[in-house]
Image: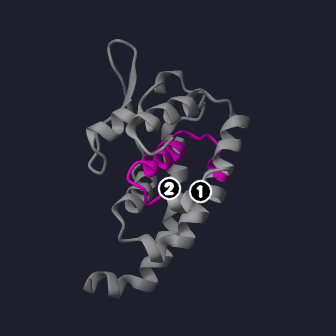
Amino acid sequence: MLASKEGLKAACALFNVLDAKDRKAVIKSLPVSEMAVNKIAHLFLIHVANNLDDTQLTKKKIMHDLGLKIDDFIEDGNFQNVLISCLIPLQTEKKENGIVVYKPNSYLTHDDLQSMSLFLEKTTSKKDRTVRGKELFRIVQTPLSMFFEEKLKYQLLD
């Protein structure tokens, strides 16, 4: 399903309307490490992390898996986008027709954001985006700090 932009649109739309129990089942079945470096599938991970109310589940299932692969994939742009989306969470805006879309940002294209925005106005998420954003930042901050403490000299020279 996540091999095309149309599949991404469908997956994001379905995730938006799922209840918490079904969202949990979806997340537990995701091959996170493989998705994080895929051109399209990584966008679904970004969408999930930015819309899932249960940030502990995000930490345990998504960010833990990514933390294990940080040495291998830190130079991959798609992998970086997933991490950046937790440091700078996606923001939304409501259009005059009532449709909710992601606001433009510096790390994702307009087309990518549009593909992930389908049915955002119908989301079952209850948590405030600001609160979720702060929680995501704290989740990603520690593994990245540890990585760069160990690898900073190499990364700067590279």
Q: Where is residue 15? Give x, y as percent.
A: 57, 34
Looking at the image, residue 14 sits to the left or right of residue 118; the answer is right
Question: From where the camera sits, is residue 38 visible?
Answer: yes
Question: From where the camera sits, is residue 91 visible?
Answer: no
Structural distance between the alpha carbons of marks 2 and 1 = 6 Å
Q: What residue sits 36% from the left and 66% below the top?
A: 76
Per the rendered image, the range of residues in magenta is 35-57
Q: What residue sits 52% from the left and 71% below the top?
A: 69
Q: Which residue is mark 2?
A: 35
Check the picture and name the quadrant holding the C terminus. bottom left
Q: Which residue is mark 1?
A: 31
Q: Is residue 29 magenta?
A: no
Number of numbered discs present?
2
> Under tag 1, what secondary structure?
loop
> Under tag 2, what secondary structure?
helix
Q: Quick one: which residue is furthest to the right in this view?
A: 21
Q: Where is residue 81? Give x, y as percent.
A: 38, 56
Say above or below: 25 vs 153: above
